[in-house]
Amino acid sequence: MAAINPGVAQTPDSVIIKQIIAEANGNSQLKQYAFELLDQVGPRLVGSPQMLQANNWALDKYKQMGITARNEQWGEWRGWQRGITHIDMVKPRVRSLEGTQLAWSPSTNGKEVTAEVIILPDLADSLAFAKWVPMAKGKFVMVSMPQPTGRPDDNWQEFGTKESFEGMKKDRAAQTAAWRQRISKTGYSNSSLTKALDSAGAAGILQSYWSQGFGVNKIFSAATKKAPVFDISLEDYGLLYRLADHGDKPMITVRADSKEMGTVPVFNTIAEIKGTEKPDEYVMLSAHFDSWDGAAGATDNGTGTLTMMEAMRILKIVYPNPKRTILVGHWGSEEQGLNGSRAFVEDHPEIIKGIQVLFNQDNGTGRVANISGQGFLQAYEYLTRWLSRVPDSIQHDLKTQFPGAPGRGGSDYASFLAAGVPAFSLSSLSWSYGNYTWHTNRDTYDKIVWDDLRSNVILTAILAYMASEDPNTTSRQRIILPVNTRTGERDQWPTPRKATRKGGL
Ligand SMILES: [Zn+2]
């Protein structure tokens, strides 16, 4: 794609594009916004006080930018607040363990609980499990397989002999299959097993969801009513497991002071710069605002959020009177099923029909590397035209794919796509997103790559500007989808799905 040719005469376009680049590079607010959102507010679990704090923080930021913003309630959720958590091994020796209480897990009711740690035994069948399960009463039960190695595969690949790497993988696969059998023989699934242990009066449940990198675990939610559930780091989980397996009867003392907050309202934060010529047509920026809460949600989706906020700040300065309305959606509860954006699509048919284009970013801190046409027949025409105004240095790694096929989930653009809106995903280079930051205990401020983020801000702001100024309204014409070779039927365009408006209860 063409770079801006410095030899050509200045059009108003190129002046504004230069100003976008100058403001993004010379006066970036990304680090300040990131500090306030990720360090001061913290993780943004739907229904948590921090999520509401983040919604209010964003209103405040937009107010400072001189941009109109509002929090729109779209539903209600089980309110839950993380508290102090301590997990200490007290027998056969003392060690403070690295672990995290899962989201929505029960607390220890203001007390410390000390109990023995036992391993889920390998039993013959569900009958044997039913006979055994009273033994879980008052115990912390380990339900995950201990990993045979805490080294990620690429480390083995780099340093191990071929034989030892292959041997490790073979042993691990066999062990994994055996553990899966151990669970299935109880007659329960992973999640219903924790409920059965809960009903039996277990003191707590210990699991370890290794994310296949050094020091990373994925942290999701608990399904129990009384027994608190903890994710324990691979290293400490292995320690407890080996001691218990050897008959040393390890004991831990746990305190988890989370609070139930009843049912609370949940919001999307929406901000807009009103269009002057076509106020009822919208260029929409989009990124989910919520996160899981094992860490700060820095790359999922702090970085998408910061990119859109910073693009809005810059547009307000250099392009305060856009032709079309520039709208940004910071969505709630993407992580539980795109709920905030689905609700917005349901609640705002008047906006949906006027959306010129929507750009969503939600897969980490990397430079945008892929844009698919999502099955819109004419998308190549306008997207390549707008992209041609983005400097080469910024779209260096960017590949486009036309016509592409409509995305069916994964992030909030899919909610709009299902309603026929030309909605696109600004898809990033990975920076080991899947293993190291996505839903992990290490998704923190320090993982942000500022140069890449700044580059994404410039890209987003230029695309928004070009889309707003375009003399044409974008086409929504869809391709005819191919016949699916597996089913023999023609694939259908995705259709809107209902938001969960009352969740976690
Ligand atoms: Zn995300």
Image: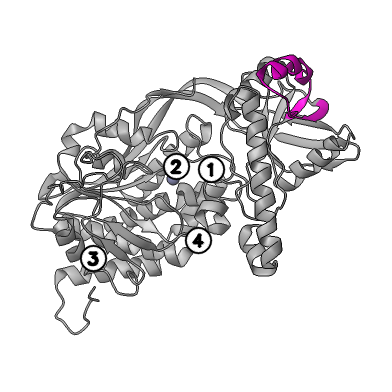
Mark 1 lies on a secondary structure that is helix
Cβ(mark 3) to ligand 1 < 8 Å?
no
Residue 41's disc number: 1
Q: Nearer the viewer, residue 446 or 19?
A: 446
Asked if the residue under mark 4 is in contact with the one under mark 2, i.e. CB atoms within 8 Å, the reply is: no
Residue at image point 48% right, 29% down? 47
Which residue is disc 2 drawn over?
Answer: 57
Judged by depth in the image, the label closer to the viewer, 2 or 3, is 3
Coordinates of residue 83 in the picture (x, y in percent)? 65, 32
Mark 3 lies on a secondary structure that is helix
Mark 2 lies on a secondary structure that is helix
Judged by depth in the image, the label closer to the viewer, 1 or 4, is 4
**The magenta stretch spans which residues?**
114-141
Cβ(mark 2) to ligand 1 < 8 Å?
no
Residue type of the residue flagged with mark 3: Leu
Mark with earlier residue (4, 3): 3
Q: Can residue 367 be seen in this view?
A: yes
Mark with earlier residue (3, 1): 1
